[in-house]
Amino acid sequence: MNISRRSLLGTAAAVSALPVARARAQSKPVFKIGVLNDQSGPYRDTGGTTSVICTQQAVDEFRSQMQGYDVQVITADHQNKPDVGAGIARQWFDQDGVDMITDVPNSGVALAVAGVAKEKNKLHVNSGAASSDITGLQCSYNTIHWTYDTWMLAQSTGGATVKAGGDSWFFITADYAFGHKLESDTTELIKAAKGKVLGSASYPFPGTTDFSSFLVQAQGSGAKVLGLANAGGDTINSIKQAKEFGLTMDIAALLMFITDVNALGLDVAGGLHLTESFYWDLNDKTRAFTNRVKPKTPNNWPNMAHAGCYAGSLHFMKAINHIGAAAAKKSGKAIADAMKALPTEDDCFGKGSVREDGRGMFNAYLFQVKTPKQSKGKWDYYNLVQTSTPDKAWRPLNAGGCPFIKA
Amino acid sequence: MLTVLGFNIGPMLAQGVLGLINGAFYAMLSLGLAVIFGLLNIINFAHGALYMIGAFVAWGLLTYLGIGYWPALIIVPIVVGGFGMLLERVFISKLYKLDHLYGLLLTFGLALIMEGLMRNYFGSSGMPFAVPESLRGATRLGFMIMPTYRVWVVVASFVICIATWLTIEKTPIGATLRAATENPALVQAFGVNVPRLVTLTYGAGVALAAFAGVMAAPVYSVNPGMGSNVIIIVFAVVVIGGMGSILGSILTGFTLGLVEGFTKYLYPEGSGVVIFVLMVIVLLLRPAGLFGKAA
């Protein structure tokens, strides 16, 4: 085997750096952030490695401001299974010294991880999951829900559709916690606006690839709007097939990320309305953020869930600075309390706050997807239609049924 | 609206037609499996992954080389079939003397590797693949809108299925193949190169999967998980039809598509399990499957 001079030098440099790193670790407490998400299944592109990159980005940018501690990022794949997710969370908290778990898409897994974080008095800063129950009926002192939720999606995308005259709906719903919550949050809103739900079809998740049957049922119902209460690959297939079957209804894709738009292509997705709380081309700061992470993830630009991992981790470290590393090590709830007390500010979400029940309070943006003609370049996909300020965007504090909030 | 005895049959008719389209995919895929199992005695779990590879090769041809859908229908089965033959020569041929279970485990492992690699390179959300220009558009049937492309899927699949069945049951090549399965040593003694025949058969089975992959590309998003979504159902089709029975898998494929279609209308939540409920019933009443010969 040939050993080049360069690799020999490189190894020598690495070896000489090791003792230094160890000496540092002994003198300073190390906080660990665990990025727990789907890295091999249907939600890989909406979370996956781009979430890890964005979390690491937050740590690297904040390193110079860390007061007497260091932060490491580790990662695992929960395979969309609540038992697997809870098992990893348990091991991370008990044995690997993890202090905060972030991302956790899939509402089923998120609720399981929230339970473990509460039991161990650690912290769960969720970005990728949707169910509004995370800060509602199943809220916890140890969980913060950063990026979006089903109520906010229903309010923004659903609300705009109803206002535009879409007063009769048919739902195609993923048959699990998330799909049903999204359908019921949207239904509430439609009924409040005196609209009607004419029918719905819940399909088995995961594993359904053909939606034509449900689309034909939707068309037959006579409803004006097709509400898609699903996500990721299912949404992509539903929309693609809706075009194929010449569906004449308006489509409300209630949860859709820019990564899904990229997979669909603008000739199919153009004209759709959707809601995100972050878009890379929103303002100078979001563009600056995207330019910093883009070289590390050139084919999968950040969506709102990725941005939430960045912003949530940044705010987590600010909270540690605020209460001191020693106090932060002892209690996840203490960090969460500090995160709620401090106002938030970052490049992705601008100025905002975290509410008592753990709900992140930011603007929600309604976008319309550009047509191929309107798009000027790579990932130039959205036109901004409407901005909901935090007081309008999120479910009122006392309406969620969170046990520790006085109604 | 179409009504019979005051009952509106329009929606049922529409679901039946849609079920037939899905049935066409089940039939094409289970056909390849049945050919491979019937003649090689290998339970080819990599079939779904090869179907996915077929769709990806079609996408790659279009994206990188500008080769469209029609040439892809010919090129992809040849390329992927060739890849299948390579797999058969290098891996699967080592297992013919062992129990079925080894073949199943090996092909399952191969499927996981193929899927993992594709996911690593292409992500999980899938690639867009447009319906070819000449098959765009739809026809209004009164009770539903029928996209032209889906009609083509049913017709093409039907032709392929019949052609495969005829080749195996009615031609000299098919006869040699069937003889080679019964008694390889004797057929070899007649001067037929049996190992080569077996390799070609595996390649042909894989080519059928790849063909189905190209057919599926414009309908479903081309993504690494598309094979594992459908393979379990296709296995149920093969089991119900009778392992290795060509005609059985064709008829069962189309029939189960219909059954699934009606379930999606009457009780959508149950559409994921109805095929397996049927499988259990068939296994209890006729363990060899509807068209299988008892061992």
Image: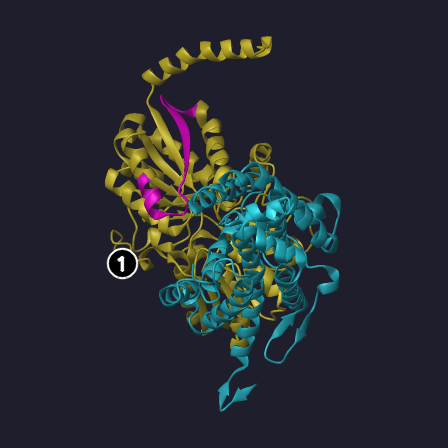
Task: Work out whether residue B18 can be spotted.
Answer: yes
**Residue at left offset 55%, top offset 45%:** B185
Q: Chain B is drawn in which colour?
A: cyan
- Residue B145 place in picture, x, y as percent: 62, 73
Where in the figure is residue B257, as x and y percent of width and height?
52, 67
Between B187 and B2, the one nearer to me in the picture: B187
The residues colored magenta run A65-87
Q: Where's residue A146, x and y in %?
A: 41, 45
Going by the image, does A17 lie left or right of A251?
left
Q: Chain A is drawn in which colour?
A: yellow
Q: Which amino acid does label 1 sit on?
A: Ala
Q: Mark 1 lies on which chain?
A: A
Whether residue A166 appears in this view of the structure is: no
- Closest to the observer: B121 or B158? B158
- Residue named by callout 1: A407
Q: In which quarter of the image is the C terminus of chain B?
A: bottom left
Residue A209: x percent and y percent? Answer: 52, 58
In the rendered view, would you say A101 is above or below A2?
A: below
Residue A38, quarter of picture = top left
Query: Which residue is rendered at x = 24% and y = 41% of the image?
Result: A119
Inspect the magenta stretch and tell me whether residue B16 lies in it. no
**Where is the N terminus of chain B found, in terms of image quarters?**
bottom right
